[in-house]
């Protein structure tokens, strides 16, 4: 795990291994940055083999309360991720993302 300069982590933030949070990022309460999961296994063991993927949060981004970022995802610099969103794919820089799964709602000014 790597945290940049002036990163703010609110109460209950969970940061897994293989996570890089760049400078000036704000993480709201109960944000989860998760780099590990399981493949779906057979009927006798649905939580199959462990798989991992790095999580990256770009400079200046703000993740609202209860956001979950899943393995292998990069949140681009300058993004806002709305409260409760589940980020399953990469977020391009300077966008507002919301929903489950999170989708880009609009561009943010530079």
Image: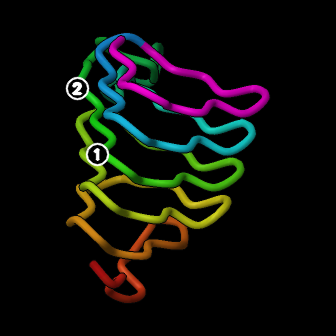
Graded by Cα atoms within 10 Å as few (under 14), some (14 to 19) or many (20 or more), the crowding at tag 2 reads: some
Occupied quadrant, residue 39:
top left
Occupied quadrant, residue 12:
top right
Horizontally, residue 102 falls left or right of residue 2, namely right
Using the image as rendered, state which of residue 50 and residue 19 is in the foreground. 19
Tell me: residue 59, above or below residue 38.
Answer: below
Tell me: residue 21, above or below residue 25.
Answer: above
Give the percent coordinates (x, y) of residue 24.
43, 41
Name the residue at 45% across, 19% down: 47
Give the percent coordinates (x, y) of residue 7.
50, 31
* Magenta highlight range: 1-16
Tell me: residue 51, above or below residue 106.
Answer: above
Mark 1 lies on a secondary structure that is: loop
Name the residue at 59% across, 33% down: 8
> Quick one: quadrant of the N terminus?
top left
Q: Is residue 39 magenta?
A: no
- Residue pointed to by mark 1: 58
User: What's the CA distance linking mark 1 and mark 2?
Assistant: 16 Å
- Residue pointed to by mark 2: 53
Using the image as rendered, state which of residue 27 and residue 67 is in the foreground. 27
Horizontally, residue 64 falls left or right of residue 73, namely right
Name the residue at 36% across, 30% down: 21
Q: Main secondary structure of the magenta part?
A: loop
Give the percent coordinates (x, y) of residue 87.
42, 54
Q: Nearer the viewer, mark 1 or mark 2?
A: 1
Q: Earlier in the sequence, mark 1 or mark 2?
A: 2
Using the image as rendered, state which of residue 47 and residue 13 is in the foreground. 13
């Amino acid at each position: 795990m790597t945290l940049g300069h002036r990163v703010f982590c609110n109460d209950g933030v969970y940061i897994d291994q293989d996570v890089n949070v760049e400078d000036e990022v704000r993480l709201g309460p109960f944000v989860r940055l998760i780099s590990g999961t399981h493949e779906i296994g057979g009927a006798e063991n649905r939580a199959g083999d462990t798989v991992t993927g790095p999580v990256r949060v770009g400079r200046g981004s703000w993740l609202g309360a209860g956001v979950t970022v899943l393995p292998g995802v990069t949140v681009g610099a300058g993004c806002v991720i709305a409260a409760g969103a589940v980020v399953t794919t990469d977020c391009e820089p300077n966008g507002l993302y919301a929903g489950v799964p999170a989708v880009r709602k609009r561009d943010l000014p530079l």
